[in-house]
Image (cartoon, rainbow, N blue to C red):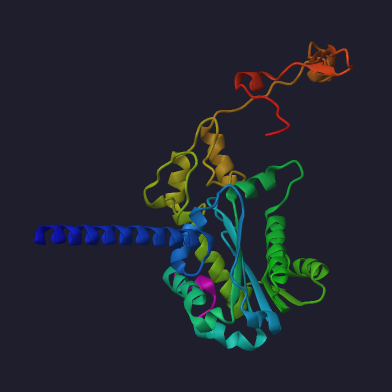
Amino acid sequence: MANAEIKTEIETKVKTEEQHDVNKEEEEKEDSKENINCINSLKSLGPFIAARENSKNTIYLSDVPQICKEQPCVLGVDEAGRGPVLGPMVYGISYCPLASKPALVELGCADSKQLTEEKREIIFNELNTLEYAKNCVGWAVEIISPNVISTSMYRRTKCSLNEVSMDSAMGLIQAAIDAGVNIAEIYVDTVGPPEKYQEKLLKRFPHFKITVAKKADSTYPIVSAASICAKVTRDHALKVWQFPEGLLIPGNAFGSGYPGDPITKRFLSEHIDLVFGFPRLVRFSWSTAENALADKAYDMEFDEPDTDKPKFAGGAGGTKLTKFFKGQTKTGQVKREECRFFRQCHLDNVTEF
């Protein structure tokens, strides 16, 4: 009898431990889901970025503190990664009530270029974890994919890097407005001539006091905060970069991305596909990338048609449009030959499920 009781007690204990493990796994899964959908600390930044498709732009807005909806706010704009040949460019904004400017100084927001990477990460983490910071400071970033940058600059109607930058800045400002931020003043680190940029912003946002200046991140703490958010986000975007091409680069050791970096130069020279060029990480519209391809990649030639008349017009041995119509049924419906792709894949049109 005693043995039976001991056996029952052991079985109960094992079941309890197993249930505890199941509950713990479920909690970890929930935490993981939250981490990839929300940035609430430095630790959660990498998983959030890694869960996104890096060939597309990603926008993230922090929760807007209630005080930023009620009191007039100052908003700063800056970017990170404008010059590198590798990786995304990141635009960032930061905002807080006019009366809360001292909080930015207390956090250590200063010229981000003068801060070490470690210090920038500490400030970013405190922006998202310290209670007084979360209650008066908000921020947002847009991660602009290198793929988007290159295709914008190469498309038929070209879009310069300045235009990409300005569109991103204005988009983030508008996103803050839509989220309910009570903006009164805007300070922007310039792209190109400050006067023209300021005129463009005032035309889009005529009700705000707007100042566009060179090196604004070293003058205005709110711009410094935006710059820190942008730089930390870009650094982590590179750390967690996933190559859809299947490349495995230990520790993602491809350097800073700037053309003068010897590690970046080596990465570019060692990872050229002679036909398809560079992996998606590379901004192939940069002259550094173009020159590397010109030296190593195969030349491509495209044959011109023998006649000015397009072949598909039917006059130069091309297929006539009428070939695709095989007559009509008795009811007058046009007969069409089924697409070969659909036949091979055994796909049929359906109107009801």
Q: In the rendering, at what x and y percent does residue 313 appear? A: 84, 19
Q: Looking at the picture, does residue 199 appear above or below residue 248? A: below
Query: Is residue 60 part of the magenta span, yes or no?
Result: no
Q: In the rendering, at what x and y percent does residue 280 appear? A: 54, 43
Quick check: can you spot residue 119?
yes
Q: Looking at the picture, does residue 210 appear above or below residue 264? A: below
Label tally: 0
Residue at 69% x, 56% y is: 164
Residue at 61% x, 49% y is: 56
Span highlighted in magenta in the image: 108-116
Q: Which residue is at the front of the view, 35 or 317?
A: 35
Asked which quadrant contains residue 21, the reply is bottom left
Q: Looking at the picture, does residue 137 appear above or below residue 312? A: below
Q: In the rendering, at what x and y percent does residue 203 appear? A: 83, 68
Residue at 64% x, 19% y is: 343
Q: Is residue 65 left or right of residue 247?
A: right
Q: Which residue is at the front of the view, 286 or 159?
A: 159
Q: Which of the image's four quarters has the N terminus? A: bottom left
Q: Is residue 35 left or right of residue 222?
A: left
Q: Is residue 19 left or right of residue 241?
A: left
Asked which quadrant contains residue 344, the reply is top right
Q: In the rendering, at what x and y percent does residue 108 appear? A: 50, 81
Q: Which residue is at the front of the view, 328 or 106?
A: 328
Quick check: can you spot residue 236?
no
Q: Main secondary structure of the magenta part?
A: loop
Q: Which of the image's four quarters has the C terminus? A: top right
Q: Looking at the picture, does residue 152 appear above or below residue 3? A: above
Please, which residue is most extreme toward the front here? 1
